[in-house]
Image (spheres, rainbow, N blue to C red):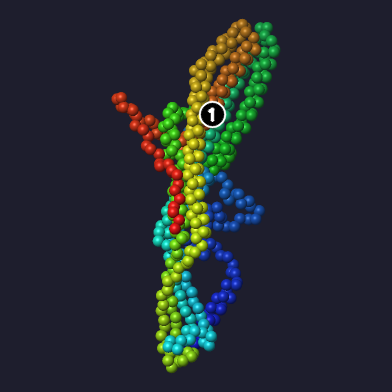
């Protein structure tokens, strides 16, 4: 009876081997594993071959709440929720989170079965009998502390990915602000050109009325030429408006044909004048710096993990040996009792030069990340200093244009218009005064947008909205409290002693 059982095991084993050589049709992922779901971009119904795949993931129509003039905060909230680069960074974080339980769990145990179907060529024991098959179950255990270090290194990988997610969010906010200010200056330019066109139409009417009292046709022609020039500028400006809207729509993942509008006036944030405070804020808030610090800590864990390879991995196992009297060489003395054995195995880490090279590799990677942290810290310092100078210069220019130059050019234009109505000046004087007003108004709109973009770049360099962290108030005769200290700067890395 046992002989038939051993033959049946042999047949099943051979049939299994033959089955490995054949492939079966690939089934749906959901049919193979109910916990695995298709990605969001996969269609449940296969698209027609003539249908472009891009239609499945096309940008959505803008929601109604984005219609009409909107503040920049509305677009930022939409971008942070729908921007595909931000979403990709978020899913990268989630992907690395799922790596932690993988690296902190033991490898799968190994089960093996050795079958000896031919009794004459199988193990024979005079006191135990014929051994038809052996079953072995083994589990490998890494050296003490290895799983913990793997988990800590993977956790710091998540911290690096979180810093990348924060950087992607800040990049998106800065991009939305830049494109918003580009759209603002384009809309403002359109309003200024339309307003000046109405003024020129009034002057053209005045010039035509003056023809009845001895005026010249040349004034009418000059007015019409200026109107044509403004129409040309308006046509070119429409292209700028469309480009700014398309760039903004790309950040919001909506149709590029959406007619976004900005508020008629900008509410620009003030900029603190203390460089040291902004630099200290950047050390604590800029995600690139935090990511580099997390990378340095991760690399230190990697060095410790590399030193674990100098020690063996332990394998513990159990073996079951089936024994039978049937087909035994000495059936009269064979007991036929199964045997159970325990075993311990371990690898021999004799190639120590290889493991030393692994430790040195991890140490050099830690040194590289520490140097990159210092490089990015220097970059942040110079970038903040440069942007602060740029913001101050644009603020001074904007104040000069608004408070001094624009009122004077408007006064000159109003005086020229009054004198022209009285026939005291020619049309060339009025035309020159109007051009000056137009140029100053366009410059103010341009400087406003550039100032807004410079402040957005400064906030990106700092890593936070700078007005959310005002200086601490001072009390009587006491200086303001210093900002919170930045994270510890990685000092010189000390290589671990090799076993």
Q: Position of residue 330 (x, y in %)?
A: 46, 92
* Quadrant housing the C terminus: bottom left
> Quick one: 219 or 188, which is closer to the camera?
188
Q: Determine crowd level at label 1: few under 14, some 14-19, many 20+ residues with C-alpha closer than 10 A.
A: many
Please tell me whether residue 24 is drawn above or below residue 480 in the rendered image: below
Q: Position of residue 95 (x, y in %)?
A: 48, 53
Left or right: residue 340 versus residue 87 is left
Q: Quadrant of residue 428?
A: top right
Left or right: residue 446 versus residue 300 is right
Q: Residue at x 51, y 80 (%)?
A: 115
Q: Quadrant of residue 488?
A: top left
Q: Residue at x 49, y 25 (%)?
A: 392
Please tell me whether residue 359 is drawn above or below residue 33 in the rendered image: above
Left or right: residue 285 versus residue 215 is left
Q: Which residue is mark 1?
A: 450
Q: Residue at x 60, y 14 (%)?
A: 433
Q: Position of residue 156 (x, y in %)?
A: 44, 50
> Quick one: 57 or 286, which is closer to the camera?
286
Q: Residue at x 56, y 20 (%)?
A: 440
């Amino acid at each position: 009876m046992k002989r038939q059982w051993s033959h049946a095991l042999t047949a099943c084993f051979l049939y299994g081997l033959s089955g490995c050589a054949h492939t079966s049709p690939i089934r749906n992922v959901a049919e193979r594993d109910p916990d695995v779901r298709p990605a969001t971009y996969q269609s449940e119904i296969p698209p027609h071959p003539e249908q472009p795949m891009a239609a499945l993931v096309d940008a959505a129509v803008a929601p109604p709440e984005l219609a009409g003039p909107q503040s920049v905060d509305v677009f930022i909230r939409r971008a942070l929720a729908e921007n595909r680069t931000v979403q990709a960074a978020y899913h990268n974080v989630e992907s690395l989170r799922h790596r932690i339980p993988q690296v902190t769990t033991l490898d799968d145990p190994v089960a093996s079965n050795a079958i000896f179907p031919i009794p004459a060529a199988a193990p024979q024991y005079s006191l135990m009998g014929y051994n038809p098959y052996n079953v072995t179950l083994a589990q490998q255990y890494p050296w003490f502390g290895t799983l913990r270090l793997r988990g800590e290194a993977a956790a710091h990988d998540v911290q690096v990915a979180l810093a990348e997610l924060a950087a992607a969010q800040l990049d998106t906010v800065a991009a939305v602000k830049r494109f918003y200010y580009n759209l603002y200056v384009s809309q403002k330019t359109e309003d200024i050109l339309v307003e000046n066109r109405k003024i020129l139409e009034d002057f053209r009417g005045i010039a035509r009325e003056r023809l009845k009292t001895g005026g010249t046709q040349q004034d009418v022609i000059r007015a019409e030429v200026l109107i044509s020039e403004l129409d040309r500028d308006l046509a070119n400006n429409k292209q700028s408006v469309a480009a700014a809207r398309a760039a903004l729509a790309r950040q919001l993942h909506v149709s590029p044909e959406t007619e976004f509008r900005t508020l008629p006036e900008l509410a620009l944030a003030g900029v603190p004048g203390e460089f040291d405070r902004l630099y200290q804020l950047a050390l604590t808030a800029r995600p690139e710096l935090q990511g580099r610090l997390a990378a340095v800590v991760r690399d230190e864990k990697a060095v410790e993990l590399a030193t674990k390879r100098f020690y063996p991995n332990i394998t513990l196992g159990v073996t079951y040996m089936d024994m039978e009297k049937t087909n035994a060489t000495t059936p009269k003395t064979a007991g036929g009792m199964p045997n159970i054995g325990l075993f311990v195995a371990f690898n021999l880490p004799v190639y120590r030069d290889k493991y030393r090279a692994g430790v040195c590799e991890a140490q050099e990677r830690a040194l590289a990340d520490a140097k990159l942290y210092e490089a990015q810290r220097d970059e942040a310092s110079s970038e903040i200093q440069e942007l602060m100078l740029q913001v101050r210069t644009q603020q001074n220019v904007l104040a000069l244009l608004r408070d001094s130059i624009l009122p004077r050019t408007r006064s000159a234009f109003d005086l020229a218009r009054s004198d022209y109505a009285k026939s005291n000046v020619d049309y060339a004087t009025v035309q020159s005064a109007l051009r000056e007003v137009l140029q100053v108004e366009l410059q103010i709109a341009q400087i406003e947008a550039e100032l807004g973009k410079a402040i957005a770049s400064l906030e990106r360099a700092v890593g936070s909205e700078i007005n959310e962290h005002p200086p601490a108030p001072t009390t009587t005769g006491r200086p303001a409290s210093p900002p919170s200290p930045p994270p510890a700067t990685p000092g010189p890395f000390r290589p671990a002693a090799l076993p």
